[in-house]
Image: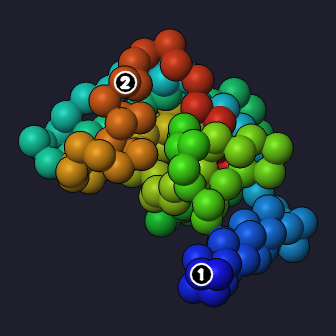
Amino acid sequence: MNHSADRTTQEARDVTSVLNSREHRKGLSELVLDVTSVSRRYPWLARVTGHVAGITDTTAWEHPNLAVRLAIPDPGDEIGALTGQPDMCRRVYTIAEFDRRSSTVAVDIVVHGPDSPMMSWLRDLAPGDRVPFAG
């Protein structure tokens, strides 16, 4: 019996439970980013820009260093899995730009090794895609 693997699986369940708890998600809004562009600012930095309906209703988006939790496909992620969406995980990013007039948000993503869930997702991301997130 592999106690180390059992412990790791239980720890993953515990972390997922905390991340999905009502207390941990207090104050977060479930939103969708309608992707309008995916570009490279530098070879090592991608920018994902899109429209988010309803964000002009609050000034919360104007605070510096605002973090959002993007939902991306990852069938193998035990930590960060979204409740009710076992093939999705969360990745936290800081809003790079926010334009209140157009309800546009931009997120910068550091480009790294090709095998991570984020890089696989980013490689296939295109204008017109919809990305659920909490913010």
Upstream in the sequence, badge 1 or badge 2?
A: 1
- Residue 58 position, x and y percent, is 74, 47
In percent of width and height, residue 86 lies at 71, 45
Q: Secondary structure at mark 1?
A: loop
Residue 8, position as x, y percentages in the image: 61, 78
The vertical placement of 96 against 123, above or below, is: below
Mark-to-mark CA distance, 1 and 2: 37 Å
Q: Nearer the viewer, mark 1 or mark 2?
A: 1
**Residue type at mark 2?**
Asp
Q: Of the numbered discs in the image, which one, if any, rests on residue 124?
A: 2
Q: Eyeballing the image, is 123 above or below 55?
A: above
Quarter of the image where one finds residue 62? bottom right
Q: Position of 56 compared to 2: left or right?
A: right
Q: Which residue is identified by label 1?
A: 2
Colour pattern: rainbow
Image quadrant where residue 87 sits: top right
* Residue 135 appearing in the image: no
Up/down of 66 relative to 7, above or below: above
The reply, left or right, for residue 12 in relation to residue 85 is left
Depth check, front residue: 56 or 52: 52
Q: Amino acid at mark 1?
A: Asn
Query: Element type at marker 2?
Result: helix
Q: Which mark is residue 39?
A: none
Image position of 131 (left or right of 123):
right
The residue located at (23%, 43%) in the rendering is 114
What is the quadrant of the N terminus in the image? bottom right
Q: Residue at x 89, y 66 (%)?
A: 22
**At 31% across and 30% down in the image, what residue appears?**
123
**Foreground residue among 77 and 89:** 77
Say if mark 1 contacts mark 2, CB within 8 Å.
no
Q: Looking at the image, is 69 positioned above or below residue 73?
A: below
Image location (x, y in percent) of residue 40 = 19, 34
